[in-house]
Amino acid sequence: MTDVKVFFDRSDLPILVPVGTLLSEAARLAGLDLNQPCGGQGRCGRCAVQVTEGEVRRRSTLRLTDQDVADGYALACQTVVEGVVRVVIPVQEKVERRLTSDRTAAEVQVPEWYSPQKQSVRRLWLSLNPPSVDDQTDDWSRLQTALRQVGVGPVQASLPVLRRIGPVLRAQNWQVTALVDQEAWDCPDCPARLIDLQPGQVVTDQPLWGAAIDIGTTTVSLWLVDLLTGRVVAQVAEYNGQIMRGEDVISRIIYATKAGGEQEMQQRVVETINTLIERACKRAGCQGEQIMKATFTGNSTMIHLFLAIPAASIRLAPFVPIINQVPTLTAAELGLHMHPEATVDCLPGVASYVGADISAGVLSSGMAETDLVTLFMDVGTNGEIVLGTREWMVTCACSAGPAFEGAGVANGMRATQGAIEEVWINADNYEPHYRVIGGSKPKGICGSGLISLLAELFMTGVIDRSGGINANLPTPRVRQREGRTEYVVAWASETATAEDITITRVDIDNLVRTKAAIYAGYTVLAQNVGLTLDVVEQFLIGGSFGKYINVEKAIQIGLLPDMPWEKFQFLGNTSVRGAYFALLDHQQRKRIHEIAGRMTYIELSADNQFYEAFMSAMFLPHTEMQLFPSVAEELRVGSTGGSG
Amino acid sequence: MTDVKVFFDRSDLPILVPVGTLLSEAARLAGLDLNQPCGGQGRCGRCAVQVTEGEVRRRSTLRLTDQDVADGYALACQTVVEGVVRVVIPVQEKVERRLTSDRTAAEVQVPEWYSPQKQSVRRLWLSLNPPSVDDQTDDWSRLQTALRQVGVGPVQASLPVLRRIGPVLRAQNWQVTALVDQEAWDCPDCPARLIDLQPGQVVTDQPLWGAAIDIGTTTVSLWLVDLLTGRVVAQVAEYNGQIMRGEDVISRIIYATKAGGEQEMQQRVVETINTLIERACKRAGCQGEQIMKATFTGNSTMIHLFLAIPAASIRLAPFVPIINQVPTLTAAELGLHMHPEATVDCLPGVASYVGADISAGVLSSGMAETDLVTLFMDVGTNGEIVLGTREWMVTCACSAGPAFEGAGVANGMRATQGAIEEVWINADNYEPHYRVIGGSKPKGICGSGLISLLAELFMTGVIDRSGGINANLPTPRVRQREGRTEYVVAWASETATAEDITITRVDIDNLVRTKAAIYAGYTVLAQNVGLTLDVVEQFLIGGSFGKYINVEKAIQIGLLPDMPWEKFQFLGNTSVRGAYFALLDHQQRKRIHEIAGRMTYIELSADNQFYEAFMSAMFLPHTEMQLFPSVAEELRVGSTGGSG
C-alpha cells in the first residue's frame, strides 16, 4: 500500500501513513489529541477538522453542513486520506482537567467495626538468627521460618522480591521489616505473599498505606488510607482520562475495539490513577511506592478497560462480560505507581451493566444488612438499581445514557464552574431564575439543573405531560429556531458564552427517555419479585451526582417514585466507600463477593415488561397519574391557584 | 568526572567513558567481547590487551612480563583509563561455541513407571455452552465451570491469559483447548494454573512439549520431551554462555557482583538456553512457544545466576545460598523462548555447593531407592559426593577446582577436538603414546587424558609418590625450562599449535590437590556416619566427564577408592536425567524435594577431619598405601619386572 504524507496544522514535519488511513488515526500517530466523545463512531461531530490541501474521502458528514464540507471540514474519525493532505485541527472543546473536590478527608468516619487485626496486609519486624557454619539454612528458608514464628503460615514471593532478600537480610544484621499480604480473596488456602522486605525495623507509628479507588466513567476517585488506623487521609478525584475517547461506556468500548485501543484506554485510566496517587500522596506526605494494597471498583466496562481485557462482549448481545471476579493482581502488572508488588484487588461485578461499583455500593450503603425493603440506585453515567433486603436482592441496569450528566443535551454540561444547577420558573410570566455553580455567568446546565428545569417547565405548564413545549405562551422565552421549539433559560447577554442557553424539544425528549428508563427499572424489579413500589421502605441513592438531586423536583418529573421525602437518603460515592470497606477488612471483602454472587440480575433488553413499563413512564410524571399522588395534588392546587 | 575517548582496534569511533573506567568495562560498553575466565579478578591473564596510545594505570600486571608491559600490554580487568587511549584487543583464545553432542536421542529409555496421568500439565478439550440472555455467566466463570466438569478444580490465570479468553472462546464457537498445570510443587493446595487457551480442538496425537534442562558450569544440556508419551525427542548441549566471564563458579560469582554483572550473567545463560530450545525444536519440528513446562537443575551458583539472585553469599563464609527451594516461575519472567506462561520449575538444592544437580542425580541414579551402601559422585567442574542408602544420606562438596576439566593446567583443555584423551608411557624409555579426540594433531590434554597421564607417569616412575618429577631419567622428555621441571607429552612438530605439549610440576600439584580433595571427601563422609570406605557396595558416577574416566588409572592416582572395577557404574548426565524424571511425573518432583530435604550436608571448609584426610591424600595414590592394595601390588610387580 502506498504511504502518503499528512501535515498537521502549521507543521512542516509530515507523518507517513498508508492511503486509506483515518485522519483520527493519523492524528494519533502524530501525537495529537483529538476529542472523540462518541468513541469515533461519527455520531457526535466533535472531531471535525479542516482539510486545507489534498484529497480525502468522507465516509460520513453527519453533523456537518454543506458549507462546512465546502470549507473543507471533515469528521476525523470518518475520513480517510487519499493522497498528501494538510489538516488543521480546530481548538478543541477543552476537557476540564481538574476536579475541585480534593480533600484531606477528615470527615470520613472510620467504621465502628474497624480493627487492624482484620487487615490482610501486615508489617512485621523480624530478628533472624544469622547463618553460621553450624546453621547453613538458606536465606529464604530462614526468612520463612522467622515468619512462621510470628504466625504467618507458608509464604510465597515473586522473583523480584526473592532477588532482594539476600542483601536486605544482611544490610542491618538480619533485622528486617517484612510486608506480607496474608490472604488473597480468591485463594484463602494459598500461601501468604511477601510484598517486600526492608532492612532494619520501621518506626512503629509510620502509616501503612492503602488506596480505595472507584473508576467512574466520568470521574475517578481515590481515597488514601492508613491501614493501621483505618483513617482516610486524603480524598482526590479527577476526570477519567478516557473521556476524550468516549463519554459513555459504549463509546469507550467501540474505541477500545480499534487497533491499539485497548492499550490506549488502559494507559489513559492508569495515567489518571497515577496522577491521583501522586496528588493524594503529596497531601499525605508519603510516596506512591509506600502504597501496599489497593481495592478497585467501577462498572464492568471500566474494570475491563482498566485491565485491558476486551470489553466488546459487554455491548453485544447477549451482553456478557469476560470476567466478573478478577483474581488478585499486583501494581506492577498494571503500571500503577504504587509499590510494584502491592496487592491489587478488583471487586466483583454481577453482570455487564451491574458492576463492582454496585456490589460495593450495596455493601457500603448497609442494604445487605437491613430487613427494610430497600431500593438502592447508583446515579452515575448509567443508572443501576437494586431492590431487596438482606435476604434477597434483584438488580438491573437502565441504559439511561448520560443525559443527566449533561450529555445528549445541547446546552448540557458537567456539574462544574459555570453550570446552572437549579432553576425556578415564575408561573405567571414564565421568567426563570437560576443558580450557577461558582456564582459566575452560566455556560450551560448540569444534571441537577436539568431535573430542576424540567420539573419547573412541567409544573408551570411550559411543557405538557408528553414533554411538548406550549408554543402559544405569551413569552419570548419560548421560540422556534431552525425548525425546533425551545425555551430560553438565559439570554446571550447574561451567559459566559455570549450565546443563549436553551432547552429544546429534542433535549426534553432525551431527558424524559432517561427518567422513563430509570422508573421502568424500579417497576420491573418490583414486578419480578411480585411487589409494587409502595412497599419500598427506604430509597438509598449513591453516586456523587445523587447528592445534588432535589427530591421534590425529581418526583415531579417521575425520576424518583412518589414517596415521603424522608424515605430518601443520599449517600454520596457508595462505590469508593465500598472499596474502602474492602480495603480495611478481609471479611468485608468476602462479604462483597457474597453479595455479588447473591444478586439476581435481570437483563432488561430482553424484557417485555420493561418495554411496557418504559412506554408508560414516557409521560410526566407517568402515564398513570395515580402513582404520583403528591404531584397530582400539586398540579391541582397549582391550576386552581392559577385560575383563581 | 571527565569523560575520555577510548578507541578500540582500528575503529575511528571511540566510546566515551569517565576517567578511571576499567578497560574491560570500556570494551563491554563498546560491544566487544573479552574473555575473562577468572571473572575479572586479574588472576588468569587471559584478558591482556595492548595499549598503543595514551595513558592507563595498571592495578596489577600479574602474568605479564616486564617486556609485555613495555610493549603496552595490560590486563583489561585491572587497568583503568586516565586519558584518551587506543587499545588493540589480541585475537582471543576462541571459545568453541558448539558442542557436537546434539542427538535425536532415541536412545533414552522412557522410565517404566511413566504414565501420562502422572503429568501435571494437561491439555483439555472443552465444549462450552454459549452464553444467552438466560445464561449471562461471564466467560471466566463459564470456563472455570467447564474445567471443573472435566475434573480440574479451582483454576487461576495470569492477566495476559485472561485478556485472551474472550476472543478465543468466541473464535470457534466456544470449542477450545485448555492447557492447564494442575499442581505447583510448592503449593499443592493452590488452584491449578491455566497456561493457555487455544481456539478449537487440537489434534489428539500432537505432542505436548516439555524441556528438562541442566545448567552446568561448563555445559548446558537440554532434553526436549513429549509429555504425552514421555519420549525424549531431542538432546542438545552447548557451552554455557557465561564461560567467557569465568570458568569456575567462584569467578562467575565475582563477575556477577560487579555492576550489571547479575543481569549480564542471567542474559548469557538464558541466551544459551534459548539457542538450545531453538536447536532442539528444529530437530523435533516444533516451536519454542509450544513448550509448556520446563524443569531446571544445576549447581546452586548456576541456579542463582540463572534467576539473577545475588550469589555472593555462596562464596563468603558461612557459605549459605539465598535460596534452595525456588518457587514455580514462568518462562516470561526469565525471558525464556518457551510459551510465556510455561511452568518453570527449578529443582531444589541442598547447600551452596550441593545443588539441584545433585538432588536430581541422586533421584535418577536410583540411589534413593537402594539398600546398598552407595557412593554417588557427580564429576563436573566441581566434585560433589553423596554417601548413603535409601535410609540415610550424607553429602559434601570438594572445592576440587576444574583441574580435570583442563583448567589450572598449562596445556589443559576441554574434551573437544584435538584433546589428548588417553596416554600410555613406555616404562623402558619413557616415550609416550597418546590418543587424540577426532584423530587430528593434539592441541592440549583433557581431563581423562590428564588422569591417564598422571597415572602413567606415576606407574612408570617418572614422578614419585609426592608428584615430584624425577629429573635424572635418561630421556629428553623430562627437562627444565624457565626454572620449572616438566615432561613433554608431544613435541612441537606433532602438535596443532606447533608448540610442545607438556605437563609441569605445577600442573601435577594442581591435579594431585584436586584428587586429594575428592578422596578426602569420601573419607570424611564415611567417618561422619562411622563407616569406612570398604563397606561401599556400589560407586555411581554421574557427569558427562565421568563417562570417560579409566577406572584403573583413576584408582592408580587415588582419585577413586580401590574397589573391584565392577562396583563402578558410569551414568552420564544424572542431573538432566533427574530433571527429566521430575518433568514427567509430579511424584518424582516431590521425591526430589524430599531427597534434598533429607540429605545431611557437611561443610568441609570448617572440618578438621577434612584437612587431615586431604593431607593424607596428597600422595599418589595415598599416604596409607594399604588403602590401595591393587596399586601396591601392581607397583610391586612392576618394580620386580623392571629389576628382573
Image (spheres, coloured by chain):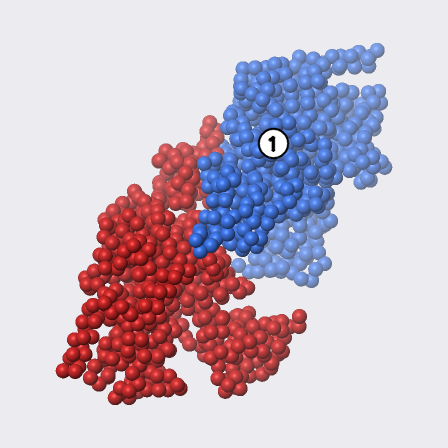
Chain colours: A red, B blue
Of residues B529 and B642, the one nearer the viewer is B529
- Residue B61: x and y in percent read 64, 44
Q: Splitting the image into 4 quarters, where does residue B470 fall?
A: top right
What is the residue that sits farthest to the left in this orientation? A644
- Residue A479: x and y in percent read 32, 87
Q: Splitting the image into 4 quarters, where does residue A411 fall?
A: bottom left
Question: Which residue matches tag 1?
Answer: B115
Up/down of B625 relative to B186, above or below = above
Up/down of B239 relative to A494, above or below = above
- Residue A584: x and y in percent read 31, 49
Q: Quadrant of the N terminus of chain A?
A: bottom right
User: What kind of element bears circle 1?
Assistant: loop
Of residues B511 and B337, the one nearer the viewer is B337
Of residues B390 and A590, the one nearer the viewer is A590
Q: Splitting the image into 4 quarters, where does residue B105 fall?
A: top right
Please indicate whether residue B453 sits to the left or right of residue A500 in the image: right
The amino acid at mark 1 is Ser
Please indicate whether residue B119 sits to the left or right of residue A239 in the image: right
Please indicate whether residue B193 sits to the left or right of residue B615 in the image: left
- At a point 49% along the width and 78% down the height, the residue shown is A62
Which chain is indicated by disc 1? B
- Residue A312: x and y in percent read 49, 60
- At a point 53% along the width and 63% down the height, the residue shown is A260
Crowd class of label 1 (few under 14; some 14 to 19; many from 20; radius 10 Å)? some
Q: Quadrant of the C terminus of chain A?
A: bottom left
- At a point 26% along the width and 76% down the height, the residue shown is A458
